[in-house]
Structure formats: C-alpha cells, structure tokens
Image (tube, rainbow, N blue to C red):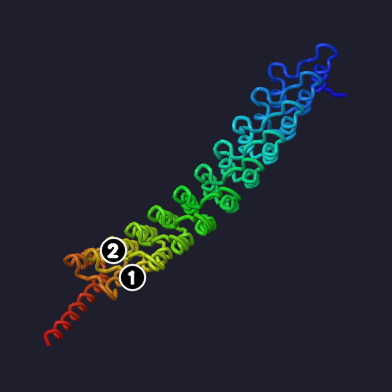
Amino acid sequence: MIQGLDGIVHMLLHAPQHAAHGNRRDGLALVMAVLEGRSKIVQMLLEAPEHAARADSRDNQALVIAVSSEIVHMLLHAPEHAARADFRDSQALTLAVNAGSSEIVHMLLHAPQHAACADGWRGLTLVSAALNSNGEIMHQLLHAPHNAARADSQGGQALLEAARWGQEGLVRMLLDAPQHAAQADCQDSEALMLATKEGHTKIVAILLDAPQHAAHADCRNGKALLIAVEGGHAEIVRLLLHATRQAARADCRNGQVLLNAVDAGRTEIVRMLLEAPEHAAHADCQNGRALVTAAFAGQAEILRLLLSAPKHAAHADCQDGQALVDAVEVGHKYIVRMLLDAPKHAAAPDCQGRRVLDLAQLLGDSEMVDMLRAAQSWRTSALGRLLSCIQG
C-alpha cells in the first residue's frame, strides 16, 4: 500500500469518479514533482490511467530542471509525449554538462527520440565541459552518435581552457578528435600563450609537436618566449627555441627577451638565449644595456656570459664605461676586475673623464682606487710600448 504524499496522489489519480487530471494546468504538478525530486509521483503522473501528464509540457521544463537520472530516464521514455532532449538547442544538455552529471549527459545524447545535439549552443557546451575539466563528458560530446561536438568550435576555445588549466589529457583529446579536431595554432596560438604563462611544460610540448596546425613558437613577435622568460620557465624556453617548425627567435624584439632575463637574474635562460641554434640573442643589443644591468646587480656569471658570447659579445666599454661606473658605485670589486680585464673592448679606468677614479676616491674605497690606478698604469705603459713599436 502506498503511504504518505505518494499515496494521496495515487488515490487522486485513481478516484472512481472525477479522477484528478494528471496534466492539469499544463503539467504544473509534474514540474513540481520533478523540482522536489519525487520520482514515484513523477512516474504516477506520467502513467496516470487518464489524462496522463505530458513529459514535454511547459516547453520541456520538467526535463530542464531534473537533476535525478532516474527522473530524466522517465521523462525521456514516457509512453506518450516524451520530453525532447533537443528542445531549445539542447538546453537540458548544457545544464547537465555544467552540473558535471555524466550519466544524465549520456541519457540526453542517447534519447530514443529527439536526442540532444552535442554541438548545441554553437559549441559552448563543449567549452563548458573543458572549463570544468570533465574529460568523461568531453569524450561523450565529441563521440556523440548524432551531431557530435566540434573540437574546433568557438575558435578552439575548449582547447584554450584545457591548456590554461593544465589538462594534458583533454588537450590531446581535442587535438585527436575524430572530426573537426582542434588546431593547436588557433587564435594565433593563444593556447600556447596560456600554457606558457602557467608553466605547463608538457602541454607546450604537445602544442608545438601537433602533427597538423602546430602552434607557432615565434608567433606574435616572440610573445610566448617573452612570457616564458618572465615566468622563469627554463624548460619551456628551451622548447620554444628548439621547436621543429617556426622556432622562437632569441633576438626578437631587439633583444628585449634577453634584457628581461638579465634583469630577473635568470642565468640559465640567458645562456640559452645567447647559445640558441639560430637567431641567438645579441649580448651587445641596445648599446650594451644588458651588460650595464648585470654589472649594477652584481651578476658575475651573467656578465661573463655576455662578455664571452660566441656572437655579438657585449663590450665592457659600452656607453662610455657606464657598466664600470655602476660597478664601482655599488662596490662590486669582482665585476670591476672582469670589466677591466675583458679580452676585447675592456673598460677604460679613466672613462667618463676620470669619473670612475674620482668616484672610487670619493667613496673611500682604497682597494678599488688601487685597482683602477694599476689598470690605468698598465694601459699607459702598453700604449707607450705600442707607440714605440710603430715609431721604431
């Protein structure tokens, strides 16, 4: 015997005379039962002996608000006037995807009649699944029996979201979709930018190695490389510089990438940029600005790399010896020695009208003063010997 509210509804629907109308007021009772999650009442309304409720009444509202897989199954398989899973561009499917209900998504996509369209809402349903990092639902949408979702819809936005959140499996799924696969270079390689910014090394590698439409490591005038340097992602820098196709240029943006690496003190990245297989960064770019920055910060190893770069090495005497002036001012004696002893274009101890020596004396650094005077004496004697050889 059915008890409680369920029992009352059963009696009303089966009254001997003037039984309740299951679809009264355009199925409002059904909607209320679905909203309360009362599956038994839903079943009774749909199977009422007379005037059964229509599962598709009120613009399929019952299906849209249903959160129980049991109730969804009843609505889709109602004996008459079953709910339409494709109503309003498959709105019920979009809501189920947003809720992460893979079971309901499966029911809607495989409804016996009028199944939901996986590519509804212009592909935003797939994007929503990517935002929720729900691989199971994404797989269902991409492999739906009818109107499967397009991985490249919305300009590849699903790929962008998967890349942003570091979902390696989802990125592969979208790139390997059976039809209309996502393109790794969509939106001017935006997925590469997002993965680089977040430091997702494996995803960067996947995007650069995509068999078709691979991301461009040199896109946007080296923006990805710039982002990787700013984030200190050394392995990503290496991937971008050694990409099989359209590798990033270490000398892009007039050496700004190198300057940023030096400014942040990223020694290993500076080395990569100076030793790039092609289009290596110029250590002397922007009139030696990188060298001056390294000298002021006391970055001895970076300074050595700049002075000994295989091509376009920095000049220790650039900007009329500004690097030497800065090193003396902040007291970096080892840096001063490196600049004075550079094998080529060594800094002059009397640069800027003896400003360096005067500055060392003003600071009262006797060791620095002796170092500069000894260098000046050596240069004077060396110049004298050279003149004697020329005259003799």
Question: Which of the numbered marks, if any, corresponds to residue 311?
Answer: 1
Q: Quadrant of the C terminus?
A: bottom left
Residue lying furthest right:
1
x then y, percent, for residue 146: 65, 41
Label 1 is placed on what type of residue?
Lys
Give the answer, above or below, for where 150 lies relative to 114: below
Question: Residue 380 sits in which quadrant?
Answer: bottom left
In the rendered view, does 324 fall on the left or right side of 36?
left
Give the answer, above or below, for where 205 lies relative to 147: below
Q: Quadrant of the N terminus?
A: top right
Q: Nearer the viewer, mark 1 or mark 2?
A: 1
Nearer to us in this view, 342 or 149: 149
Neighbour tally class for label 2: few under 14, some 14-19, many 20 plus, Cα within 10 Å: many
Label 2 residue SS: helix
Q: Earlier in the sequence, mark 1 or mark 2?
A: 2
Tag 1 near tag 2, CB within 8 Å:
no
Label 1 residue SS: loop
Residue under pointer 2? 288
Neighbour tally class for label 1: few under 14, some 14-19, many 20 plus, Cα within 10 Å: some
Label 1, label 2: how far apart the Cα atoms are: 14 Å
Residue in view at x 76 percent, y 18 percent: 51
Residue in view at x 67 percent, y 41 percent: 102
x then y, percent, for residue 17: 84, 11
In the rendered view, does 45 fall on the left or right side of 314?
right
Question: Residue 92 sits in which quadrant?
Answer: top right
Residue lying furthest left:
391
